[in-house]
């Protein structure tokens, strides 16, 4: 869920703590906020609770769900709050339908290109 940084006030105690750790740096968002619950989220915790990894072996805490909302590290209050901590997950970007991604040619695209550039044999 996109939100504008620093839309609400951060407590004086939190500001002092942040200044001690990062002098002159802007406070970045440390969480992702989802617009709706995902299919793998536990139905029992939908009232309010902690969000855990869906794999049986892992079960690590990924974030929290609070319908009343919570404050982002940037200061903005997000309601409802379905918060996933960035440090707990790996960011994965969807690949487009094209075979070329960030300048890397995938194998099937290379074969197509080679077939198109090879002169016909007589």
Image (cartoon, helix red, strand yellow):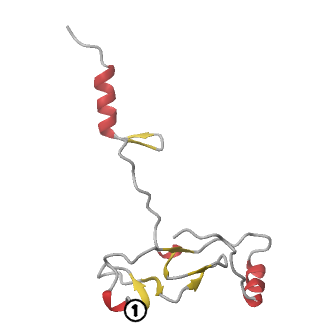
- For residue 101, side relative to residue 44 (left or right): right
Task: Provide residue 108's location: percent of width, then percent of height.
Answer: 29, 38
Quarter of the figure with the C terminus:
top left
Dividing the picture into quadrants, the one containing residue 18 is bottom right
Task: Provide residue 27's location: percent of width, then percent of height.
Answer: 69, 73
Front residue of 52/80: it is 80
Which residue is label 1 attached to? 47
Dividing the picture into quadrants, the one containing residue 98 is top left
User: Residue shown at 64%/69% (left/top)?
Assistant: 4
Task: Provide residue 44's location: percent of width, then percent of height.
Answer: 32, 92
Task: Provide residue 26's location: percent of width, then percent of height.
Answer: 73, 70
Front residue of 28/105: it is 28
User: Residue shown at 43%/91% (left/top)?
Assistant: 49
Crowd around label 1: few <14 · some 14–19 · many ≥20 (10 Å): few
Front residue of 48/17: it is 48
User: Residue shown at 79%/74% (left/top)?
Assistant: 23
- For residue 28, side relative to residue 36 (left or right): right
Q: Can you say whether 109 is above or below 26 in the image?
A: above
């Amino acid at each position: 869920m996109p939100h504008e940084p620093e839309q609400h006030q951060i407590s004086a105690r939190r500001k002092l703590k942040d200044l001690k750790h990062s002098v002159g740096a802007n406070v970045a968002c440390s969480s992702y906020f989802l617009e709706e619950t995902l299919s793998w989220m536990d139905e029992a915790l939908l009232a309010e609770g902690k969000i855990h990894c869906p794999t049986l072996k892992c079960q690590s805490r990924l974030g929290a769900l609070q319908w009343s909302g919570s404050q982002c590290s940037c200061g903005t209050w997000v309601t409802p709050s379905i918060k996933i901590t960035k440090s707990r997950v790996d960011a994965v970007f969807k690949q487009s339908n094209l075979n070329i991604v960030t300048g890397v040619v995938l194998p099937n695209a290379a074969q197509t290109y080679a077939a198109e550039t090879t002169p016909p044999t007589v």
